[in-house]
Image (cartoon, grey):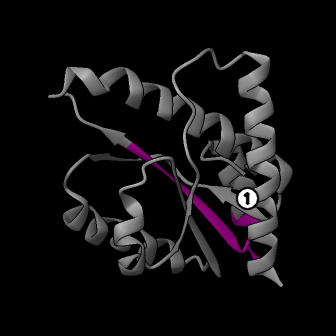
Amino acid sequence: MQWTKEDIELYAAEKKYVDTLIIPLIPFNPEADHTLVKEAFQRELNQLTTQLLEKEYRGRVLLAPDYNYITGQYEHETQRINEWIEKFKKQPFEHVFLFTFDTKWKRWEQNLNGNLLWIPSLNERKLQSSETRSYVKEQIHQISELIRAYWD
């Protein structure tokens, strides 16, 4: 289920079956021109990946709104993300996954109240290319195995 009116209405009626939350972590730093394209591509790739992952587990997973953060402020952002997670856990969600392509989150992983799903990003290219689609499908397969391991 996605963060849309229709899906949230369905979630509210069926929340006992939806035990997993995925929060996309989206880096953003408008001060650094050299990273704007990379971060925009990561956002698009993150959305594509998490939407396909949600589609695979529709009815068990809720895809939260994107969590946008300014790069370089990970300590502060860790506290803020944990506040989000605590509010979401009141629904309740048994499993919370934070999805990112930003390797810097690995350093802060132990401070997060959810499970970090980090995968390496591709270099900027067309999202519609067969190479990108193939990469995303392979990553979804691997992420799915990891999520199922938490469910067992």
Query: Which amino acid, mark 1?
Result: Ile
Above-or-below relation of 88 to 25: below
Q: In this view, does 92 lie above or below 134?
A: below
Quadrant of the snapshot with the C terminus:
bottom right
* Residue at 67%, 58% in the rendered image: 62
Secondary structure under the numbered disc 1 in the rendered image? helix
Q: Is residue 135 above or below residue 140?
A: above
Image location of residue 98, percent across then percent down: 52, 62
**Magenta highlight on residue 109:** no
Q: Depth check: 76 or 123 in front?
A: 123
Horizontal relation, residue 126 to residue 68: left or right:
right
Where is mark 1, residue-wise?
Answer: 143
**Part of the protein shown in magenta:** 12-26
Image coordinates of residue 9 in percent, x first then y, are: 69, 54
In x, y percent, where is residue 50?
A: 66, 45
Residue shown at 19% from the left, 56% from the top: 73
Q: Hey, which quadrant is residue 64 in on the image?
A: bottom right
Residue 58 seen by the camera:
no
Q: In this view, does 1 lie to the left or right of 22?
A: right
